[in-house]
């Protein structure tokens, strides 16, 4: 069966993307941003999951940037309704200040480990079944 092998390769690629994001953001600029809008958004096809949709602004070298991000991190889900005007920690890419995230770097490394593990297992099952 070639399907597990293809799934494994796709998972490894996705894990690589998360690792790249991890590296880009840990070497980035740690700064503060201000929440301009926050609320809940439901995502999912069959099972709807509540996610926090947060719009924040930050300033670098006198230029203001705005970013909207959807987060499933518990620290954002529990206080979404009271976040407007709150100062939050963000990570900004050094070479692209318009790209920022409010996710912790731990989010990306956990995703990398998960996709790497599932990808390797799926690829090995695919190779073994050939």
Image (tube, helix red, strand yellow):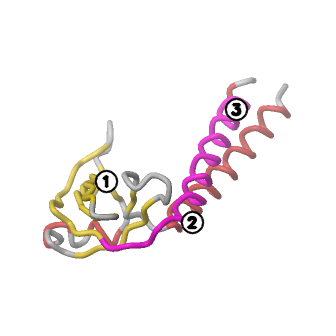
Circles 1 and 2: CB atoms closer than 8 Å: no
Q: Where does residue 85 sit, x and y in percent of width and height? A: 14, 72
Residue 50 seen by the camera: no
How far apart in space, not on screen, are marks 1 and 2 (Cα)? 20 Å
Q: Out of 96 and 2, give the one closest to the viewer.
A: 96
Residue 8 seen by the camera: yes
Residue identified by numbered label 3 = 4
Residue identified by numbered label 1 = 69
- Whether residue 42 appears in magenta in the rendering, the answer is no
Q: Out of 27 and 80, give the one closest to the viewer.
A: 27
Q: Secondary structure at mark 1?
A: strand
Q: Where does residue 10 sit, x and y in percent of width and height? A: 63, 35
Q: Residues within 10 Å of mark 3 (few under 14, many from 20)?
A: some
* Residue displayed at 57% across by 62% down: 110
Circles 2 and 3: CB atoms closer than 8 Å: no
Q: Earlier in the sequence, mark 2 or mark 3?
A: 3
Q: Nearer the viewer, mark 1 or mark 2?
A: 2
Residue identified by numbered label 2 = 27
Q: Residues within 10 Å of mark 2 (few under 14, many from 20)?
A: few
Q: Residues within 10 Å of mark 1 (few under 14, many from 20)?
A: some
Q: Secondary structure at mark 2?
A: loop
Q: Where does residue 23 sit, x and y in percent of width and height? A: 60, 60
Q: Earlier in the sequence, mark 1 or mark 3?
A: 3
How far apart in space, not on screen, are marks 2 and 3 (Cα)? 35 Å
* Residue displayed at 38% across by 73% down: 31
Q: Is residue 90 left or right of residue 116?
A: left
Q: Secondary structure at mark 3?
A: helix
């Amino acid at each position: 069966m070639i399907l597990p092998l293809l799934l494994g390769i796709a998972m490894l690629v996705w894990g690589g993307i998360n690792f790249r994001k991890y590296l880009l953001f840990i070497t980035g600029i740690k700064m503060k941003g201000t929440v301009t809008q926050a609320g809940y958004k439901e995502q999912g096809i069959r099972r709807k999951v509540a996610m926090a949709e947060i719009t924040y602004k930050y300033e670098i070298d006198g230029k203001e940037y705005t970013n909207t991000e959807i987060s499933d991190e518990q620290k954002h889900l529990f206080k979404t309704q009271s976040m407007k005007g709150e100062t939050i920690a963000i990570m900004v890419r050094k070479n692209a200040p318009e790209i920022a995230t409010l996710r912790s770097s731990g989010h990306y490394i956990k995703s990398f480990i998960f996709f790497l593990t599932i990808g390797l297992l799926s690829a090995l099952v695919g190779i073994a079944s050939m």
